[in-house]
Amino acid sequence: MNTGVRVLEVKEGLVPCQEGRRRPLDNCRFCVHSRRFRLCDRWVPSPARAYCTLQRVTNRVDFTGVSAVECDDDGNEGFRSIMTVIS
């Protein structure tokens, strides 16, 4: 069963965003598809979800310790800025 959620491992500051395309982890901070970040042994909500009505996240995420991104991009769209949603 495909839930549409993937866990993308961070390697050398890059995330396998779309098939065959790696993007800087910093893009995930502003991407509508990023749900959570694995920071050490816990998952923290993505700052991009702060604009969602269901989840108000305001805490900063220390991206130097992030080892994975939980991504809900099940259509292989790739990076889409949260600014396209809130503008």
Image (cartoon, rainbow, N blue to C red):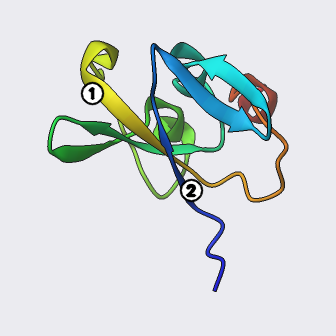
Residue 74 image offset from top left, x and y in percent: 74, 59
60 or 73, nearer to the observer:
73
- Tell me the kind of residue under disc 1: Asn
Asked whether, in this view, residue 67 is left or right of residue 18, the answer is: left
Toward the left, the furthest residue is 41
83 shown above or below 68: above
- Return the residue at label 1: 59
Asked whether, in this view, residue 34 is left or right of residue 45, the answer is: right
Q: Residue at x 76, y 35 (%)?
A: 85
Q: Secondary structure at mark 1?
A: loop
Q: Quadrant of the C terminus?
A: top right
Question: Within the image, what quadrant is residue 40 found in?
Answer: top left
- Tell me the kind of residue under disc 2: Arg
- Return the residue at label 2: 6
Residue 32 image offset from top left, x and y in percent: 66, 39
Toward the bottom, the furthest residue is 1
72 shown above or below 65: below
Residue 54 image offset from top left, x and y in percent: 47, 58
